[in-house]
Amino acid sequence: MATKYTLPRGTYDILPEDEYKWQFIIEKFRSIAARFNYYGITTPIFERVEIFERSVGDESDIVQKEMYTFTDRKGRKFALRPEGTAPVVRAYVENGMNASQQISKLFYYGPMFRYDRPQKGRYRQFYQFGIEYIGSDNPYVDAEVIAFGSLFFKELGLQNVRLEINSIGCKDCGREYDKALIDYFKPFYEELCSDCKKRMEINPKRLLDCKNPACKKIASKAPAMLDYLDKQCAGHFWEVQKYLKQMDIPFAVNPRIVRGLDYYNRTAFEFIYDKLGAQKAIAGGGRYDGLVKEFGGNDTPGIGFAGGFERLILTMEEQGCTFGKSSKTDIYCVSLGETANLEIAEIIMQLRKAGFIVAYDADKTSMKAQMKAADKSDAKFALILGENELKNKSVILRELKSGKQSEISQNKLIEYLSK
Ligand code: AMP
């Protein structure tokens, strides 16, 4: 017996009944990107593994547990990309983009890969859209990047998406904060998970990001980064908030947002839809002022965000969004007899060239079967070509809803339908 193959766990097929939803989101994303003056960039799906180790962080969950890595025939180690920022910054530096222009505003979308336990809104191959604004540390830019996300979700028709922002400071104020965190967590050391015990030595801020319920509970009372910001970082964060207010973008400050990746500094933010439950962050992002330099470029600041298509679609479905409307068939063609079966091919091509959406099933030969299929379709008209019409060089156009029909000369058909 032939073997039946199934999908790898944590992946899915995008089937025709859903594909238009993806196209709708992509079109909207590209439209906002154009208005915000962003340009598209596409990077490979796999990269050298070091790119993620050095940016996302050796000790991060993504690098430690979630990366799909493989060694090629020459022994080089690669990873399926788990996120989009590091590859974009790699491409930015590699292509000398900061030499050719001061500011690069880039957008991308495509599949990402993380080995995590699949659940609603969490997959092993998932699709992200994202933007990167490289070349400015002006707080206006932080607000503008956030504004991009905010307008995008609004134009998709979403409601009740909350914006939470935080500042995680810079390396200097981060050191003070790390000390405060270590002092706070030390008495709870034995209660922490083994990962958090390691985090205490390597990157104490990650203690705030642990998903383990016991660690989470302890972390909920930990000191807040905001109290440890130095003057410049506090000033920057204040300015970002002023711009957001000026742009009429509602937000809440949540000092618990730390973001799991090493490269972030200063502004961090998330767009949240609570009804999604455990995986409620639709999009998240932040500033990464040291990343370009880390990748061998000039010291150039940057900020961006990324969001997931799957959580966006779940939210949109839950809210009854229409995703534009799926394309409706204009005409269902019906042909009877050998000559008509041949001549209908020409009529179908003419109609499609003129821009109509045309359906036809060459395997159905009886009038009854074809009309039944036409009735079941979402087409506005059935177009019938039988012996009589062949003689008259005409077709019958039947309006499927009302059943009204008329005979139209073939050379007047396009003109008639265009009215
Ligand atoms: P991150 O890169 O972890 O900040 O994630 C940014 C966004 O990508 C999240 O808010 C989600 O919408 C989406 N995302 C991240 N990981 C997954 C996953 N495993 N499955 C589906 N969506 C994801």
Image: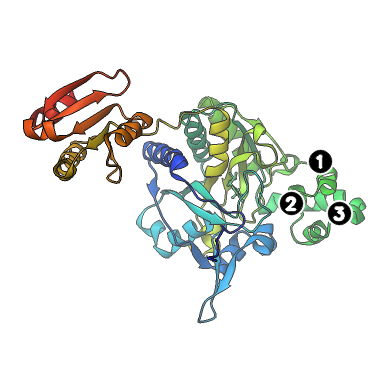
Q: Which mark is residue 272?
A: none
Q: CA distance from mark 3 to mark 2?
A: 14 Å
Percent coordinates x, y for residue 297 in the rendering: 48, 62
Mark 2 within 8 Å of ligand 1, using the beta carbon: no
Q: Dividing the image into 4 quarters, which one contains the N terminus?
A: bottom right
- Is residue 321 left or right of 373 when viewed as pictured? right
Q: Which mark is residue 205?
A: 2
Q: Which mark is residue 192?
A: 3
Q: In this orientation, does residue 176 appear?
A: no
Percent coordinates x, y for residue 227 in the rendering: 75, 40
Number of the front mark, 3 or 2: 3
Q: In this orientation, does residue 253 appear?
A: yes
**Earlier sequence position, callout 3 versus callout 2:** 3
- Is residue 412 left or right of 296 when viewed as pictured? left
**Type of the residue with mark 2:** Lys
Q: Which mark is residue 220?
A: 1
